[in-house]
Image (cartoon, rainbow, N blue to C red):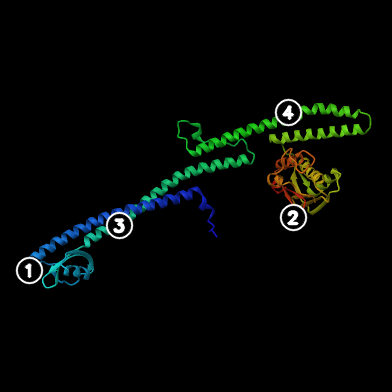
Amino acid sequence: MRPTLPRWAGTLAVKAAAFITVMCCALAALLGVLVHVSVTNQTVGQARDLALTRLQDATQAYEAGDTLLPGAGVDPEGLPVRLRSLALTGKRGTMVSSHQGRPTMWAAGPANGHRALAVEVDYSQQARTIAGLDHSILWSSALAIGATLLVGAFAVTRVTRRLHGTAQVARRITAGDLDARVNDPRTKDPTRPQDEVAAVAAALDSMASSLQSKLLSEQRFTADVAHELRTPLTGLHAAAELLPPGRPTELVRDRVAALRTLTEDLLEISRLDTGREKLEADTEELGALAGRVVRASGTDTEVRIVRDARVETDRRRLERVLGNLVANAHKHGRAPVVLTVDGSVVTVRDHGSGYPGYLVAHGPQRFRTEGGAKGHGLGLTIALGQAEVLGARLYFANAVGGGAVATLDLRRAGG
């Protein structure tokens, strides 16, 4: 199983900061090692040359029978075993070891009688130099990493802030605010360098403008069609009323009534699309209002009051929402249809085949129905639009035991 990372660990800023830190640490370590090796080799080389020079002087004095200078002797105490063994083979060599509590550079060579002639050079200053260098490398690397991290975090934060702003505008557009734009300053000034974030912002603004233009065109078309149909339909309805009684007359009147209903629905949708609908709020008893809606529908819908509530809402719009939900349940579902009031939440359930998959996933779509169902898909579209005007939430789902369930949550509207 893969470990679950904290939510903040997946952000671009954290990833960029981690990448910058790792790269800075790697670069500092590489440079530190190179400097350490170079200076150490130079320091050790100088100490080795000094020790070998003194060994050569001590050898000449020893062969001439002169007194050896301080720090030189035959098989002296503290001479490393490996270096003594090398000298006994007739070779010269050097080695750093600790002697009498301090670092010492030893140089040794052969002497008469299978003995080793050696000199010692105090290596404390060189050791302190290398230790100081290592300390300076660590501190300078830490400071360089910190400064680089701060500068990198500042640069990345500016980019991520712009990306978050672009994402926020995209969410506003998704929620229906087609006037939202990023308006990145880089896209307005052609003299400024255009980076990838500016390109994304410009593409999003262009898409939003195009989408808004198309939707406004569609809304104008819907409103124009509905207005143009209203006048001839009024005349057609008046003419149908003058026809003599009979089956043909009933068919004509029925179709004229259906056309008038469709036209009124289109006009209502066009008004909802404009977003200029105003609430006429008042306090209503939700249980009593639900009962009036059911009685007005003329259906055998069962009303269940689990917990009644008083809500501040627009009575006409709420009746429109509940009436459309009840009508849709009887038209496309099967009995029994139950309207339940539980506080500020109202559910309408039927026992039919349930809502289509697209409707549950994406909500109702005008003029789209499935399974040979009659209608134009406008009833639920209007119910959803009026619920949004009320400030309520309308959900569509399918019950586990079968049937469609529409849930109207008025708690936001009353809050």
Nearest-to-viewer mark from 1 and 3: 1
Q: Height in image: 413 above or below 245?
A: below
Q: Residue 39 location, x and y as percent? A: 25, 55
For numbered disc 3, what is the local secondary structure? helix
Q: Quadrant of the N terminus?
A: bottom right
Distance from the alpha carbon under mark 4 to that under mark 3: 82 Å
CA separation in Å, label 1 and label 3:
41 Å
Residue 313, percent from left and from top: 74, 44
User: At x 61% / y 35%, what residue is drawn?
Assistant: 179
User: Would you call the spot at circle 1 few (<14 residues within 10 Å), some (14-19), or many (20 or more)?
Assistant: few
C-alpha span from label 2 to label 3: 71 Å
Q: Please, what is the three-letter code of the amino acid marked with disc 2? A: Val
Q: Which mark is residue 400?
A: 2
**Any mark on residue 67, and which?**
1
In the rendered image, residue 2, in percent from the top left (x then y), is placed at 54, 58
Q: Which residue is mark 3?
A: 134
What percent of the width, then of the height, locates residue 314?
75, 41
Instruction: Depth check: give the residue in front, 218 or 49.
Output: 49
**Outermost residue to the right:** 245
- Counting residues from the N terminus, which is met first, the one under dot 2 or under dot 4? 4
Q: Which residue is mark 4?
A: 224
Disc 2 secondary structure class: loop
Mark toward the viewer: 2 or 4: 2
Look at label 3 and name its amino acid. Asp
